């Protein structure tokens, strides 16, 4: 998918979620709604993706997660 098309879909989905839900809700609500809108528009979206951190050959168990990828 071209970058311009992807950018437009992400921006449109973000604006729609904010317009429909408004401000003041918990982050999780927006994350789930945005993932839904992105998926509907044909954008593959993953949530709570584990981000491994490696130091000196060992994987550090830090619990980092990417909210929405």
Image (cartoon, helix red, strand yellow):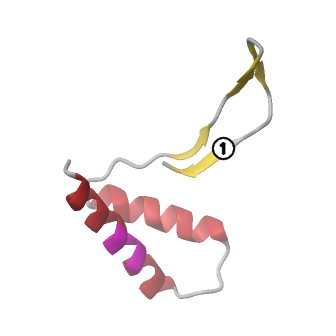
- Tell me, yes or no, whether the highlighted magenta stretch contains residue 67: no
Q: What residue did someone put label 1 on? A: 65
Q: How many marks?
A: 1
Q: Position of residue 49 (x, y in %)?
A: 58, 40
**Span colored in magenta:** 11-15
Q: Is residue 1 left or right of residue 43?
A: left
**Relative to 44, residue 14 above or below:** below
Q: Position of residue 9 (x, y in %)?
A: 28, 65
For image coordinates 32% across by 73% down, the residue present is 12
For image coordinates 39% across by 79% down, the residue present is 15
**Relative to 60, residue 8 above or below:** below
Q: Is residue 26 left or right of residue 56?
A: left
For image coordinates 80% across by 28% down, the residue present is 61
User: Which residue is at the front of the view, 36 or 6?
Assistant: 6
The image quarter in which residue 30 lies: bottom right
The image quarter in which residue 6 lies: bottom left
Q: Position of residue 13 (x, y in %)?
A: 36, 70
**Relative to 68, residue 55 above or below:** above
Q: Is residue 40 left or right of residue 1?
A: right
Q: Is residue 1 left or right of residue 35?
A: left
For image coordinates 37% across by 79% down, the residue present is 16
């Amino acid at each position: 998918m071209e970058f311009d098309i992807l950018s437009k879909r992400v921006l449109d989905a973000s604006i729609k979620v904010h317009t429909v839900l408004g401000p003041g809700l918990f982050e999780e609500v927006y994350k789930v709604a945005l993932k839904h809108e992105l998926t509907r528009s044909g954008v593959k979206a993953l949530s709570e993706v584990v981000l491994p951190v490696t130091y000196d050959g060992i994987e550090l168990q830090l619990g980092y997660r990417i909210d929405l990828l």
